[in-house]
Amino acid sequence: MNFEIRNRIAARVARDIPEGAYVNLGIGLPTLVANHFDKGKEVFLHTENGILGRWVAAEQGYEDWDLINAGKEPIALLPGAAFFHHADSFGMMRGGHLDICVLGAYQVSAKGDLANWHTGSPSAVPAVGGAMDLAAGAKKVYIIMELLNKTGESKLLEQCTYPVTGLECVSRIYTDYATFEINTEGVYVIEILKEISFEELQKLIPVKLILKSELLNVN
């Protein structure tokens, strides 16, 4: 996924986050969301290593490596941001104090199960880390990912084949092809981003899709 598309998806997520929300941004692509909020929008970003408030990526040449997000990327804090202990950060996660968490994923099932920590590879990370706490503790889980893996197979599946991080926790998926919403009725397509039809999108995904009546095509 190229830089332009990555930022386009991150900006789309930022637009969906409501005023006053407490939001955790996961490692990787989700960190880009911090750069796309309107200046006047009050959102409280949260990171596992103990920051709450607003920040953006640090400009090249102005990095302070004592100021990093959960992905160890240098950030620049905006006025009002606060620091606190790592344990308190996890207390927020586990105590149900986060409105939304934005995570990456290897796979998502049609029921909203999330697999985002292990692919079975010997070189994969050894443990699930804070992703499990976020998936269980946040009120909503938004996923940013490429729709297809490196072999061209859909990451949106009937059932996850990788170890699961959380069950029935995902409510939205933002991809380079389309935006999906998962609820008890099924998987809805709410936007199509690529120049493809709904029927062409369906052929890529082994899950029955439902076309939302107010579909917004943003080609």
Image (cartoon, helix red, strand yellow):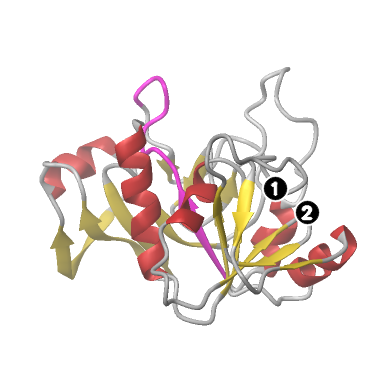
Above or below: residue 82 compared with residue 20:
above
Q: CA distance from mark 2 to mark 1?
A: 6 Å
Q: How many marks?
A: 2
State the residue at coordinates (70%, 77%).
97
State the residue at coordinates (59%, 75%).
99
State the residue at coordinates (57%, 45%).
58
Query: Nearest the camera: 62 or 80?
Result: 62
Which image quarter: residue 63? top right
Q: Position of residue 1 (x, y in %)?
A: 36, 31
Q: Is residue 10 visible?
A: yes
In the image, taking residue 201 as reference, residue 117 lies left or right, namely right
Magenta part of the chain = 140-152
Above or below: residue 86 compared with residue 106:
below
| Residue wearing tag 1 | 70
State the residue at coordinates (44%, 76%).
41
| Residue wearing tag 2 | 49
Query: Nearest the camera: 145 or 49?
Result: 49
In the image, taking residue 176 as reference, residue 60 lies left or right, namely right
In the image, taking residue 23 as reference, residue 66 lies left or right, namely right
Q: Are marks 2 and 1 in contact (CB under 8 Å)?
A: yes
